[in-house]
Image: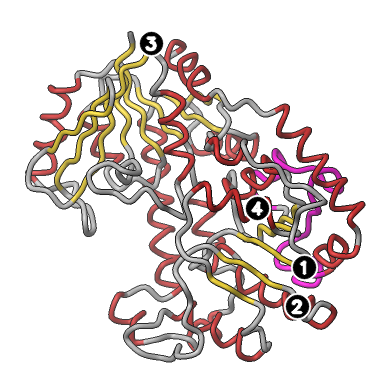
């Protein structure tokens, strides 16, 4: 039996008081669901939280750890944090260390402490690309016009965050050069890793998708007309400002169009330059008012995976408007359900979609193309059914056995 230490950036859903409802990261819980049944793996899963000592929680035959250091900017130089990981090394004594994402704030510290143990980095976001595309094409002049006291107080205006991700990209390079190997899903991601860390071996495994999405099936007989679902998007990178431009165009032809957005509600009615409103939220609020979209957009709150799957099976079309994506989990989830999709042609999306077969692609940031594709799907049930059927072929060809895939990788390294 292989003893594997997973290092994750947040607790698993339902552990250490964590909510079971989340609008992001469901693939991590899906990976656990798959691997937890593999008798050849003994999982030890560690993250950080607002604690003063290591807290241990058992789940079936696996052990979960909550280490000090969470709740603010992680301090790798803290003696408490360093000693906590050294103690965890003694307790867990793993054969392999797997870190879920280069964006994990404590990844470098973990790789340093566990340096003699084979290590894997599961690539989630690619920080270099996130840094380049964080601003979503929003001009610096526009960024300054929407700067709010909240942004200044929290030092979180758009350009500041972009530079913050640029620093993470440098750190990403260091982490990948320390690791034994990386797990990727597509050529785009592998090519990037090879360019900055040529000695880092790359293995393939599909992003795990929760069973709720496999259990739902979009049908041309049961969808709600003129409705759209999209990814959560409280940062420019996710492209909601482009999607809102597209929605304004669609609205001229379909006044009843409805866009459902997962995540915390955006109070566009009272949004203003104050200590409660982020600059990007202010921009989106202004667009809603200017384009008269108050009745066409609904923020539906944090959704469980089952609720997400239900929305995807109910709407007319799913739109993925991101500026950059490695593997968009929400796009893959929509493909699994069979929802007719419109997607930006960025990053690793080429490994997920084929234009005109299982989705309609557009070049970011072309809002008119999004609008045109959405209207085509609204107008033609035949096209919607064709895209859904194409997605069903993708569904059939996609492996969902991440437990077996990871076990094979563990054996190889």
State the residue position of label 1.
Answer: 226
Q: Is residue 141 visible?
A: no
Residue at 73% in and 47% down: 218
Residue 107 horizontal side relative to residue 368, left or right: left
Q: Which disc, if any, is residue 116?
A: none
Point 39% across, 37% down: residue: 100
What number is the disc on residue 256?
2
Please say if 34 is above or below 110.
above
Mark earlier in primary sequence (4, 1):
1
Compared with residue 225, is residue 94 higher up or lower down, i.e. above or below? above
Disc 2 versus disc 3: distance between alpha carbons? Answer: 53 Å
Tags 1 and 2 touching, CB below 8 Å: yes
Q: Which residues are magenta?
A: 346-371
Mark 2: few, some, or many residues within 10 Å (few <14, many ≥20)? some
Q: Residue at x 53, y 61 (%)?
A: 232
Report the number of numbered marks.
4
Mark 1 and mark 3: Cα distance apart in space: 48 Å
């Amino acid at each position: 039996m292989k003893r594997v230490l997973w290092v994750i950036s947040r607790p698993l859903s339902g552990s250490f008081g964590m909510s079971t409802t989340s609008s992001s990261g469901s693939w991590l819980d899906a990976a656990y669901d798959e691997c937890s049944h593999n008798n050849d793996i003994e999982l030890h899963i560690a993250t950080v939280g607002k604690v003063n000592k290591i807290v241990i929680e058992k789940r079936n035959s696996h052990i979960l750890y909550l280490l000090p250091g969470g709740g603010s900017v992680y301090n790798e130089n803290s003696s408490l944090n360093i000693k906590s990981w050294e103690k965890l090394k003694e307790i867990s004594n793993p054969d392999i260390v797997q870190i879920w994402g280069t964006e994990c704030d404590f990844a470098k510290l973990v790789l340093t402490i566990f340096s003699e143990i084979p290590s894997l980095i599961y690539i989630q976001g690619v920080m270099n690309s996130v840094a380049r595309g964080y601003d979503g094409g929003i001009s610096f002049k526009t960024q300054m016009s929407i700067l709010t006291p909240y942004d200044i107080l929290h030092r979180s205006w758009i350009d500041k965050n972009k530079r913050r991700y640029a620093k993470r990209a440098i750190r990403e390079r260091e982490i990948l050069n320390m690791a034994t190997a990386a797990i990727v899903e597509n050529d785009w991601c592998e090519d990037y890793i090879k360019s900055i860390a040529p000695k880092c071996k790359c293995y393939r495994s599909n992003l795990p998708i929760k069973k709720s999405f496999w259990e739902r099936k979009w049908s041309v007989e049961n969808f709600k007309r003129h409705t759209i679902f999209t990814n959560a998007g409280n940062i420019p990178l996710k492209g909601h400002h482009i999607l809102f431009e597209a929605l304004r165009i669609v609205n001229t032809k379909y006044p009843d169009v409805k866009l459902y957005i997962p995540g915390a509600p955006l109070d566009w009615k009272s949004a203003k330059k104050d200590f409660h409103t982020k600059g990007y939220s202010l921009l989106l609020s202004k667009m809603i008012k200017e384009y008269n979209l108050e009745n066409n957009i609904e923020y539906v709150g944090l959704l469980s995976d089952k609720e997400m799957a239900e929305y995807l099976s109910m709407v007319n079309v799913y739109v993925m408007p991101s500026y950059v994506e490695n593997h968009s989990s929400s796009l893959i989830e929509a493909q699994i359900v069979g929802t007719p999709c419109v997607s930006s042609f960025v990053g690793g999306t080429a490994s997920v979609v084929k234009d005109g077969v299982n989705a309609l692609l557009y070049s970011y940031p072309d809002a008119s193309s999004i609008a045109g594709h959405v209207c085509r799907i609204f107008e033609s049930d035949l096209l919607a059914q064709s895209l859904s059927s194409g997605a069903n072929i993708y569904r059939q060809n996609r492996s969902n056995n991440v437990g077996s895939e990871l076990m094979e990788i563990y054996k190889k390294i």
